[in-house]
Image (cartoon, rainbow, N blue to C red):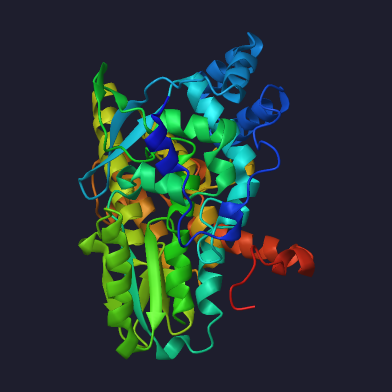
Amino acid sequence: MLNRSLKADVVRTSECGNAASKRPPSRSPLLGLTDDEPWLAAIETFRTRNPRRVQRIDAYETLLADGTHRRVGAAVLDGRYQPAPPNEAWLNKVDGRKKRVFQYEPVDELLFRVVNRMLQPIAEEAASLWCRSFLPGGGARAAFRVVTADADLASKAALRLDVRDYFNSIDVVDLLARLPGSLTSGAVGELLQRSLFDPRVIRGGVVVDDTRKGVMAGTPLAPLLATLYLSDLDREVASSGATYSRYSDDVLVLAPPNELAALESLVRTRLNERGLEVNEGKTSLAAPGEPWDFLGFRYSAGRISLAAITEHKLKARSTRLARGLLRWREQTGASRERTLRAFFRRTNRRLYGVPLERADFSWATWFLPMLDTPDPLSGLDHHVQREARYAATGRRNPRTRSEIPYRDLTDAGHRPLVSAYWDMQTARRARPPLERDRPATRHPFH
């Protein structure tokens, strides 16, 4: 598909690459792509995390029922499969801005979900110790563990940087040059080249060319590729002796105050060399002993709480939902009880996942296990309760508390975050010590 000179440029290894990037693969990581098992496993994972997306689940199952997955798998292994162009969409953010995302048609989306699962072992080996985002055991706890293991943390200044529109800004030629050889050769390499170098996107129902779409935020392989892309930067910053952690596009550097300016210059220079732009609105500096934010959390005097922006986003979403349901209630004449049930059904879906016992990632599972105290959750609970009453009455005043008592809220499905926090603490203490304390990943300081 690609001309010879471009392919040669794509598969060169980075000067900062590790040994794994220079070692030819002994076998294709996509072996088994024509079997049913990996496709069924990908569908079940999607069903568990997105049980309400019934149409997409049905589309996936239809692909397996008619054998499309085997034909697609065979074409990929032969190096001749060309994914269709993805659809471009824009998501509204809390601050009024829009986020550009892409979505493949079901057959290609499911293919890349399966491929992502198959490439996880390679990604785990190739990823730096300082960034394990979107890999097993690579959540917020792993990112913070890298930082809080530093006994001299209190004496260091903190720098937080965020890369603007990271996924869609990645230079794919540079990306493929820095990936391990097992991801740039054979069937995997051909599939990545055919998808990432294809300029076509569907915009407003029309196929257009767009050469600046990077790894395409919203597509299944984007998180894995984005995690690996800056691995050499991770190693370079960490080798300076700084305390460092990255979660995809979110970078945290801690060092003595007199060293931080040089480290900031280094990070900015390396990002600029790759055509990546720092989001200045999310850049922050903290002197030793001052609080700093990372991944939606605030670290202060050895304790972890919620960052102000995290609380703001949750409150804003709750307020926006209440306004929408109030308009719906006024237009349809829905009862207060029905409005409350609708409010908490959607709130619980965001906070805890749906159904609760099957959701393995949600707001609660990301934030609650990290908090040292439930104190910030009480204010969020009160805000949610106030907005629920507003949706049902159209008023925000003390009288609504007597009109709609707390029992009515819990009957409608309200589950306070404070209660969820203590439930998680109880469940954690009940687990065996070895399971409870097992590290999520190798530690760079060990």
Where on the picture, by quarter, is residue 204? top left
Q: Tally the marks.
A: 0
Where on the picture, by quarter, is residue 120? top right
Up-down relation of residue 420 to residue 195 (above or below): below
Quadrant where the N terminus lies?
Answer: top left
Residue 381: image location, x then y, percent = 42, 57
Pick the residue in front: 263 or 64. Answer: 263
Left or right, residue 12 beside residue 433? left
Q: Residue at x 41, y 47 (%)?
A: 175
Residue 9: image location, x then y, percent = 40, 43
Residue 339: image location, x then y, percent = 37, 34
Q: Residue at x 54, y 62 (%)?
A: 128
Can residue 79 be seen here?
yes
Pick the residue in front: 75 or 346. Answer: 75
Pick the residue in front: 61 or 209. Answer: 209
Extreme residue toward the top, this view: 66
Where on the picture, by quarter, is residue 256? bottom left
Residue 440: image location, x then y, percent = 64, 62
